[in-house]
Amino acid sequence: MVGWAGGGTGQDFFIESYDEPTDWWGQQHTVWGEIKDSKSQEVVDSIFKLPTHVQGMVMLDDKIPFELKIVQC
């Protein structure tokens, strides 16, 4: 699942890779997507292999710039 949470240090972007979608994320964070295809999962898996550090939770050592675009279906 993909989500956003504002907090004490600013906005945080989350990607979580549980075996099954969580039922509690929508109550604690703004969930705005799910990883549903294998090509997208490959991208997530490559992000999870990047260098990290623990700061309350596991955080990437370096920021990843990205852009969101609204696509009408």
Image (cartoon, rainbow, N blue to C red):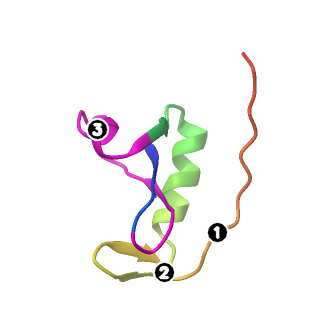
- Magenta stretch, main secondary structure class: loop
In the rendered structure, find residue 27 and report the number of the disc placed on it.
Answer: 3
Mark 1 or mark 2: name the one nearer the start of the chain: 2
Which mark is nearer the camera, 2 or 3? 3
Tell which tag, 1 or 3, sits nearer the viewer.
3
Q: Nearer the viewer, residue 60 or 68?
A: 68
Label 3 Cα neighbours within 10 Å, binned few <14 / some 14-19 / many ≥20: few
Amino acid type of the residue tagged 2 in the rendering:
Pro
Q: Residue at x 35, y 73 (%)?
A: 58
Q: Position of residue 2 (x, y in %)?
A: 47, 45
Q: Which mark is residue 64?
A: 1
Crowd around label 2: few <14 · some 14–19 · many ≥20 (10 Å) = few
- Image location (x, y in percent) of residue 62: 58, 80
Q: Earlier in the sequence, mark 1 or mark 3?
A: 3
Mark 2 to mark 3 CA distance (whole Å): 30 Å
First in residue order: circle 2 vs circle 3: 3
Up/down of 1 relative to 11, above or below: above
Q: Is-magenta flag for residue 23?
A: yes
Determine the residue positioned at 27% across, 35% down: 20
* Figure quadrant of the C terminus: top right
* Range shown magenta: 8-30
Mark 1 is surrounded, within 10 Å at the Cα level, by few (under 14), some (14 to 19) or many (20 or more) other residues, namely few
Callout 2: helix, strand or loop?
loop
Cα gap from disc 1 to disc 3, whole angstroms: 26 Å
Q: Secondary structure at mark 3?
A: helix
Regarding residue 23, the answer to whether it shows in the image is yes
Query: What residue is shown at x 60% (from left), y 41% (from top)?
Result: 39
| Left or right: 20, with 35 as reference point | left
Quarter where residue 37 is shown:
top right
- From the image, tell me which residue sits under label 2: 51
- Tally of numbered discs: 3
Q: The residue under label 3 is which amino acid type?
A: Gln
